[in-house]
Each structure stands twice: as structure tokens, then as C-alpha cells.
Image: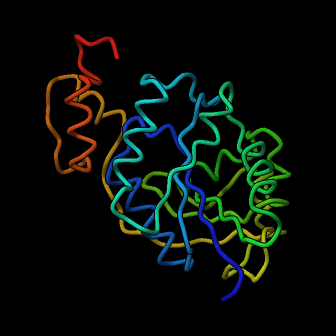
Amino acid sequence: MTRPRIGLLGGTFDPIHIGHLALARAARDALLLDEVRFIPTSHSWQKGNAGTPAADRLAMTRLAVAHDAGFAVDEIEVRRGGDTYTIDTLIELRRELGLTPALVLILGSDQLRNLGTWHRHEELLQHAHIAVTQREGHRLADLPAPVEALLQAHGRQALPDAPAGAIVFFVMPPVPVSATALRAGLARGERPAELLPPAVLDYIERHRLYRADSGR
């Protein structure tokens, strides 16, 4: 395979946890990705402001992927600031990387269901492929009409040798972790070592993140 394949995994990562890492590994293995770039948001227009400052979320993401040569962190959305739109990120990455690499936007099935609400969603496949995995409680059947139309036009059994334009699916084992529940547990003073990379948990404790008395 001569065309590089670069996976793109965006999110607030507030905090990054084992579910995010499992998703990235599953996508890398299933789709033969050369690299997965984790892209922390600055401000997600659909989620509102992340509760933790971008600098902390970026630092935790770097710690989580530091020992995996196939993972990297991209500051592109944090540097940009303001509302985060995926289409703007893809256009900027194309300017940086050129037209040769295959860019693969990694999504869960919940994000696929909402894809029709994304800013300029109809342009996403001009710049990247989309790879989707099933998430618990979010079926891939009975999709909204705009999403179903995209699947009919662009759905493929496997990634083609092209820089963009296809929607494919891959399988990963379920990883039962919720960022909302995780933050609530941290606020109660819990130490969920089974859900967080050790370096991330150490960072959270050192900087007193998510503590009910910290205001962060």
C-alpha cells in the first residue's frame, strides 16, 4: 500500500479514557491505518464549552498516546479556537498534507446518526473517508434520510485506494465507559484506575481536575 492512511479521531477528550484508545486501536487494525491523529476540540458547537480548559485536555491526550508510535496528537482545533467545525479541520489538513494521503474520519454510530446536522456535512466526503463503528444503544438501522442518502451513494465494503469519498464500517468490542459518569466519579473523589491511562489519572490528581472543590 503506497497511499498513506491517516485516521482522525476528534473529541473533547474530557478526559481521554480507555474507550477512546480502544476505538483508535480498533480502527487502526481494521482499516490498516498508518497513523491515528487525536484531535481535541477547542469548543464543540454541538456540546457547548468543554468543562476543562483546552490546555489540560490537550496535555492529557498527549500523555495517553505517548507510548504508542502509531498515535499522535494534532493541535489544529485548539490552535484555531472558537467553534469547532469538522469541515474546517479537514480543509486545513488537506492544505497541510496534500491530496495524496487517505484521511479517515473515525466516528461512532451515534455520531453517524447526527451527521446530517453537522455544519456543511455534505462536503465532508470531498476531503475524507468516514469509518463508523457501532456504539451501544445507537443502531445503524432506520437512519435519518440525509444520512441514509450518503450511505447509498458512498457506502463501501472496504476503503478504496483513494484519498476520500467512501463510508465504511468496522467492528470493535464494547468498552463500557461513559465520560459523564467518569467525571462524576472523579468529582466524588474516586480513582477509576481501570478506566484511565495511569499518566492521565496522575495528571488529573496533580492538577486537581474534576474535583467538586476545584471549580475545574
Q: Is residue 67 visible?
A: yes
Residue 184 vertical placement versus 91 (above, below): above
Q: Closest to the observer: 15 or 183?
A: 15
Looking at this rendering, what residue extends furthest in the bottom direction? 1
Q: Residue at x 70, y 65 (%)?
A: 103
Residue 199 vertical placement versus 152 (above, below): above
Residue 1 vertical placement versus 94 (above, below): below
Q: Is residue 39 left or right of residue 93?
A: left
Residue 1 vertical placement versus 113 (above, below): below
- Residue 210: x and y in percent read 29, 23
Q: Residue at x 73, y 71 (%)?
A: 101
Q: Closest to the observer: 155 or 206?
A: 206
Q: Is residue 172 left or right of residue 83?
A: left
Which colour assignment does the render follow?
A: rainbow
Q: Residue at x 33, y 58 (%)?
A: 175
Q: Closest to the observer: 18 or 80?
A: 80
Residue 60: name its quadrant. Answer: top left
Q: Residue at x 17, y 23 (%)?
A: 188
Q: Is residue 66 left or right of residue 186?
A: right
Q: Is residue 149 visible?
A: no
- Residue 202: x and y in percent read 20, 38
- Residue 113: x and y in percent read 64, 50
Quarter in which the N terminus is drawn: bottom right
Count of numbered tags: 0
- Residue 54: x and y in percent read 49, 29
Residue 169: name its quadrant. Answer: bottom right
Quarter in which the C terminus is drawn: top left
